[in-house]
Amino acid sequence: MSTERTLVLIKPDGVRRGLVGEVVRRVEAKGYTLAALRLVRATPDLLAAHYAEHTAKPFYPALVGYMLSGPVVALIAEGERVVEGFRSLAGATDPTTAAPGTIRGDLARDWGSNPIQNIVHGSDSPASAEREIAIWFPEA
Ligand code: IDP
Ligand code: MG
């Protein structure tokens, strides 16, 4: 495998609001390739593995409730520097201040509820990407 890969999750708010096509469109329009895509229901164990760095944070229980609130679309995107490139497409964590033009800046907002609901997850480094891909796509 020479090309870089990243894990993208379209979180339950993105699926519920009918934004799967829009997020996938942006990934493809940027020029990245889809290597895998599936609709999944997360589980508490899967989320504890995925969000290992956050399990002790005060917002973690709310984050788990949010991620279990409906199905998630998991996908693997491929291409040179795709980890950095998708983080740039996604925008800042807080959708209120995420730049217009980004997925979070254009499609998400503060709904006055905990945790921050921001449509997508993207791996933050190539090492995180491979770790997270193994969690969501154990066969990949
Ligand atoms: P990221 O998704 O931009 O990488 P992380 O800091 O890794 O942001 O946090 C993971 C997810 O947890 C965020 O996308 C958001 O849904 C939620 N989150 C992060 N920080 C907070 C917070 O301070 N309060 C509530 N929820 C948060
Ligand atoms: Mg993160």
Image: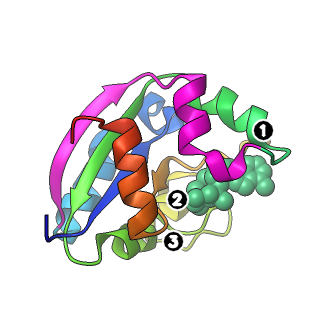
Image mark for residue 34: none
Report if residue 50 lies within the magenta region.
Answer: yes
46 shown above or below 37: above
* Residue 19 seen in render: no
Residue numbers of the magenta segment = 32-55
Residue 137 image offset from top left, x and y in percent? 30, 37
- Measured Cα–Cα span from mark 1 to mark 3: 22 Å
**Residue at (53, 22) in percent of width and height:** 43
- Amino acid type shown at disc 1: Ser
Residue 3 image offset from top left, x and y in percent? 16, 70
- Amino acid type shown at disc 3: Pro
Look at mark 1 in the image and give the residue it sits on. 113
Q: Which of the 4 image quarters holds residue 59?
A: top right
Q: Mark 2 or mark 1, which is nearer the start of the sequence? A: 2
Which label sits in the foreground, 1 or 3?
1
In the structure shown, which secondary structural element does the residue marked by tag 1 occupy?
loop
Q: Nearer the viewer, residue 4 or 41?
A: 4
**Numbered disc total:** 3
Residue 25 image offset from top left, x and y in percent? 23, 54
Look at mark 3 in the image and give the residue it sits on. 100
- In the displayed structure image, the side of residue 87 where residue 59 appears, left or right: right
Image mark for residue 104: 2
In the structure shown, which secondary structural element does the residue marked by tag 2 occupy?
helix
- Measured Cα–Cα span from mark 2 to mark 3: 8 Å
Q: Nearer the viewer, residue 8 or 139?
A: 139
- Amino acid type shown at disc 2: Arg
Which label sits in the foreground, 2 or 3?
2
Q: Quadrant of ligand 2?
A: bottom right
Disc 3 packing (10 Å; few <14; some 14–19; many ≥20): few
**Residue at (86, 45) in percent of width and height:** 58
